[in-house]
Image (spheres, grey):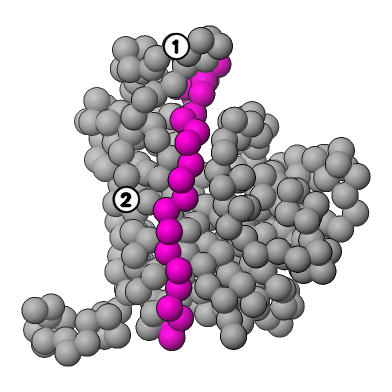
Amino acid sequence: MIKKNSQILENPLQDIDWPYYWKRDLKSLPQHNKKKNWDNIASKFKKWMEKDDYPERLLSKVKTQPNFTVLDIGCGEGVITVPMAQKVSKVTGIDLSRKMLEILKEKADKEALNNLECFEGDFSDINLENMGHYDVIIASRCLNGIMDIEKLLKNINQMADYVYITLWGPTSRDYENEARDILNKEHPQYPEYIYIYNLLFQMGIVANVEKLECGTINAYNDLDEAVDRYRWKMGGLTSEESEILRNHLDKTLIKKEDGTLENPHEKPDWILIWWKND
């Protein structure tokens, strides 16, 4: 039996305070894991995503029609935004990083897209009043760090007919934790995707859940690039830690036929949660 405040819960799925546990897990993270400066890695991120099949897998799941309007939350440099704009009537992107949005606009100009607009800002505060209604909302790989997740979910549910969210799966951080073990660093305990599913259930939304079958393993041009990317993901490292990590990756990474390096343990694990409002 599950207890809360020393009392038995008659209906755990309805009675458990899922937003509390989500916030608890976020607050327990080391400070450097809570916020990363996306402006600093915007140009690198574009290169990192060149061989990623995640966008293709996600886009294949999203309901679209030529007359649809789409809001891409946490759009970054447009790996979802730009191809989506080629399918629908209008796409709006919102992101905190000015540098990311500049790259997105460059991509849109290159593709001669005139149905795409971008806003720089904190998407945790969006609602029906300040952003309007859309046929589709996509929140791709951007909600794991949102503190008031309940408010945001309620808002985006009011704003769209279809909502698509992707979150880290249960094994998505395993390869990073291998590196943390080498460095004697703690494993950050990010909130699990199931919290969001259960919270949606409490909101009366029976969402669909599936694992995106992505086949891409990150490829690095050289050891320096691998160390740089791991350093960013882990929230920064000292020069001594970077050298230890370099030695670890030098032994772990495998050289492919094209000369790039990959970690065979670095397999993508993304969970898609989506629903349709009737």
The region drawn magenta spans 203-228
274 over 57 or under it: above or below: below
Neighbour class for label 1 at 10 Å: few (<14), some, many (≥20)? some
The answer to whether residue 76 shows anywhere in this view is yes
What residue do we see at 33% from left, 59% from top? 192
Secondary structure beneath label 2: loop
Q: Give the percent coordinates (x, y) of residue 260.
A: 52, 15
What residue do we see at 30% from left, 38% from top? 174
Task: Verify whether residue 79 appears in magenta.
Answer: no
Neighbour class for label 2 at 10 Å: few (<14), some, many (≥20)? some
Q: How many marks?
A: 2
Most foreground residue, 138 or 129: 138
What residue do we see at 78% from left, 56% from top? 87
Q: Which residue in the structure is indicated by mark 2?
A: 170
As shown in the figure, which amino acid type bears the numbered disc 1? Answer: Lys
Q: Is residue 27 left or right of residue 59?
A: left
| Residue 5 picture quarter | bottom left
196 over 8 or under it: above or below: above
What residue do we see at 47% from left, 64% from top? 273
For marks 2 and 1 on the same chain, the one whose residue lies earlier in the sequence = 2
Tell me, for residue 275, which label it has, or none: none
As shown in the figure, which amino acid type bears the numbered disc 2? Answer: Pro
Quarter containing the N terminus: bottom left
Q: Give the percent coordinates (x, y) of residue 116.
A: 82, 56
Q: Give the percent coordinates (x, y) of residue 6.
A: 9, 84
Q: Is residue 19 left or right of residue 3?
A: right
277 over 135 or under it: above or below: below
Q: Give the percent coordinates (x, y) of residue 243.
A: 36, 15
Tell me, for residue 255, which label it has, or none: 1
Secondary structure beneath label 1: strand
